[in-house]
Image (tube, rainbow, N blue to C red):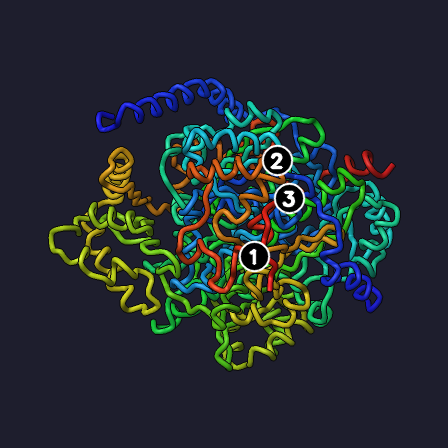
Amino acid sequence: MEGYFSYTTELFNPSTVNEKPEVLKGIRVLDFTHVIFGPTVSRTMGNYGAEVIKLELPFYGDLWRPATYWGRYWKHSNPIWHFVTQNKYFVSVDLKRPEAQDVIYRMAKTSDVVVENFAPGTAEAWGVGYSSISKVSPNIIYLSCSTYGQYGPMRYFPGWDLLAQAASGVLSLNGYPGTDKYFKLPDYLGDFVPGNMGTLVVLMALYYRNKTGKGQYLDLSQTDSMMRSLPHFTYCSVTGETLGRTGHSDPAMIAASIFKTRDKKFLALACATERQFEGLCSAMGKEDLLKDRRFTDYLEGLKEENAEALRKIAADWVKSQDSGVIIKLANSKGFAAAEVVDDKMICYDSWRRERGSVILFNDEMYGEIALAGPSARLSKTPGRTKWLARPVGYHNRLVLKKFLGMSEEEIQELEKKKIIGTYDDKPGLKPPVYYNLDEDPIYNYGREVKEKK
Amino acid sequence: MRLFKKKGKEVAYTRYSAAAASLSVWKEIVERLMTPEGRPEVLEDVMVLDASYANFSGIIAASFLAEFGAEVIKIEPPEGDPSRKMTPFGKNVKGVGIPFMVEGRNKRYMTLDLKNSEKDRKDFAKLAQKATIVIETFPAGEMDSWGIGYRQIVEKNPGLIYIAITPYGQYTEKAREFVNLPDSDITVQAGSGLAAQIGDPITEPEPYNWPLKAGMWMGWYVTGLSAALGGTMALVYRQSTGEGQMIDVASMDAYSSMTGFPASIGYTWENARPRIGVLDFILYPYGHWKCKDGYVAIAAPRDHDFRALIKILGMWGRTGEFESDWRYTSDRIPDILDQAMILHRAIEEKTMMYTSDELVKKALNYARKAARSKWRGGGVPIIMKVMTPDKTMENKQWEIRKSFKEVEDETVGKYVITSGFVKMSESPPQVKWVSCDIGKDNEYIRTKYLQ
């Protein structure tokens, strides 16, 4: 066993992550996305080495830039936004202007993937839809993200995470049975889950293109994606009944619920197998339950009245114990248990720091912040963070000069016409006050910069 | 249109004609999207061994790969995987639980007793030599101690991608200490930060102010998705280099790593967010309200959306209350919950006067007019009926998009599942068949891979 853990510790060593190769090196993503759903698709690709060029409207920027929790900014930026748009090149082009199209098409020509999440029809109307982009770059992989999809009677309905949750049925399910109390999934999961699915399907298309040379068009709807997580439809078709809200409990597993411990902590318990149930009974000192006809068979124990009776027994036991004791017992006897953790516990948990699930990232512009690492760690090609979000238009010069070979004069011409631009003086859009952009060699790419003091 | 100047008119006209020209391309694409049947499969050359045990995150990861055409072989002991029995209220058909039926898409079933039989482990090793991906959810190092872990298989199969899913991962002190702790959806929801954010504020009565479980297997689902995503990333790397690798998925990271909010907020605020019931930390209005015949979800968070919403609810311009009250115009997301709830209840008073259909219609009409008017500032208040899953199934949108599919299994009969979560013009995911019998494909697999 020791041999195994020293082997894996070496294999996944978090301190060597930045020396390892990147899967998507050389893949260029043209990113027309905004808010969270679309940006998550390209961000995840950026984590694995893709060059993501994020296009924003000059002076406005992405809608989500100023949207921080309770309006609390961090160094004039949105702390959540840093996770959502890390590793991207921030280019600011006014898409609506016909003159901008030339720039866009030149970018599209060298890109492998395009991602957009405008309301369906908008990208086509602005000349950056699949029909136009595939003309300049025939083998492009083009992903359109929307709430209800690109076709069907609801295609023009506007929508966000919340509406996808409402339309898929997800919203109605998180709450208490027999009451009006229910809640949406927090933190825009209706954007993050479909966003990760977006990355998955783009990778599938990339794998296919590597084999056949063919690009394709992808239509991902966030409602569809959320529906994929519900067994409720099948439940309905098999039993003819609806499966509604189930409160703190998981009706599909034995003794699965959230309980309160003696030291006033919240704790989740569950038994996935009959053997785990034996472990729980032994921990509770209630081996007699193993002979109880109601619980001996797993399926029998899940029946509503039996499950209810068992949960009551478990709740009484948990109430009489400290959380730490139960978790130790769970580990030694073999049943599932975990304490409910909050933001602060996650941020400062030493396990997460050691594993690289939460990293302290040191950014050149913003300094130190805690960021989440990926939950799937690849031994040879791990995902990583290279830089945080940047002000609107920060990479204009770098991208236009380095990637498109434009000259300083051409860029100044575009700036004069306000086809490209930078940020307005608003938090979320602008750099931190202490940061002098005139001295920044990336912002001024290809121009003389004053020496940094 | 009359309001436009001549130059504006020309611009509008060019856009219109460009749109018309692209219409034929569009038509062809949509036709392709609508007919996924019989199109090429991305992963036709990929074989997956899913040895996950009593754990749906592995099964869900394998499902994603199976839908894209991989040959997925579920390995389970002769008595069947315990996950077959995990089903809401014990509802099953001939011993097969509903979640297992949902994930039974395009899969093959083989019985191998990895825990007890040396001979079966040898067969597994032989299969693994031909596999592209192995998925397992045993305690860290258990497969290794049986001689069929990543370390051993990779010697003969350097292209192998090995996905191991456990609560705390394959390395670190904690993983070592809690190596025998089993995995479950509810513990993932609790231990990765999801449950803490759902539920009523602490000031409300118990147990409503407790952290709450999401009503579906969101913990396992997110873990499975992360595993599938990591596996596909590794597949792309393997495609160009021929090299495989090991992937370590810790389910206790599922939620916190997917959204990233807990880590960054915990750091910058140096505190934990409390539960705030039906409100939102960032946007307002962004939630659900009671109406005459059920509930509606309303999202109108930008200033012009909010203005539009209070106009269509008849709260603007009559009482003079809303447009002049700074609390609503400048700060709709206060961290003083009582203040936020005043506005929340004021909106509910109005939504209660209409049916959900009326409200949805009002919002759509406003948005349509606002898009054409230069005076309305383009406000888009969005209102949608809150659907229960049975109502979702009746929605025409999903019928046209073929999001539900009736399938038939020899043993359990006909049932409906979700299918084709994404539409692709060349190589879409598909549900070709469903099946769930234990050891159904033993013969087929032995002939194909073990001779």
Q: CA distance from mark 1 to mark 3?
A: 27 Å
How many labels, in total?
3
Q: What mark, if any, has residue A50 been given in the picture?
A: 3
Q: Quadrant of the N terminus of chain A?
A: bottom right
Q: CA distance from mark 2 to mark 3?
A: 20 Å
At 41% from the left and 67% from the top, the residue drawn is B275
Query: Closer to the observer: label 1 or label 3?
Result: 1
Query: Closer to the observer: label 2 or label 3?
Result: 2
Q: What mark, if any, has residue A405 been given in the picture?
A: 2
Categorize mark 2 by other alpha carbons within 10 Å: few (<14), some (14-19), many (20+): few
Q: Amino acid at mark 1?
A: Glu
Circle 2 sits in a helix, a strand or a loop, which is it? loop
Q: Amino acid at mark 3?
A: Ala
Dots 1 and 2 on the same chain: yes
* Image side of residue B164 versus residue A387, left or right: right
Q: What mark, if any, has residue A73 been given in the picture?
A: none
Circle 1 sits in a helix, a strand or a loop, which is it? helix
Residue A160 placement (x, y as % from top left): 40, 46
At 42% from the left and 36% from the top, the residue drawn is A417
Residue A284 placement (x, y as % from top left): 59, 77
Q: Is residue A167 above or below residue B428?
A: below
Chain identity of mark 1:
A
Dots 1 and 3 on the same chain: yes
Q: Quadrant of residue B200?
A: bottom left
Q: Quadrant of the C terminus of chain A?
A: bottom right
At 44% from the left and 56% from the top, the residue drawn is A428
* Image side of residue B259 versus residue A211, left or right: left
Residue beneath label 1, please? A439
Q: Earlier in the sequence, mark 1 or mark 2?
A: 2
Q: Is residue A448 above or below residue A301?
A: above
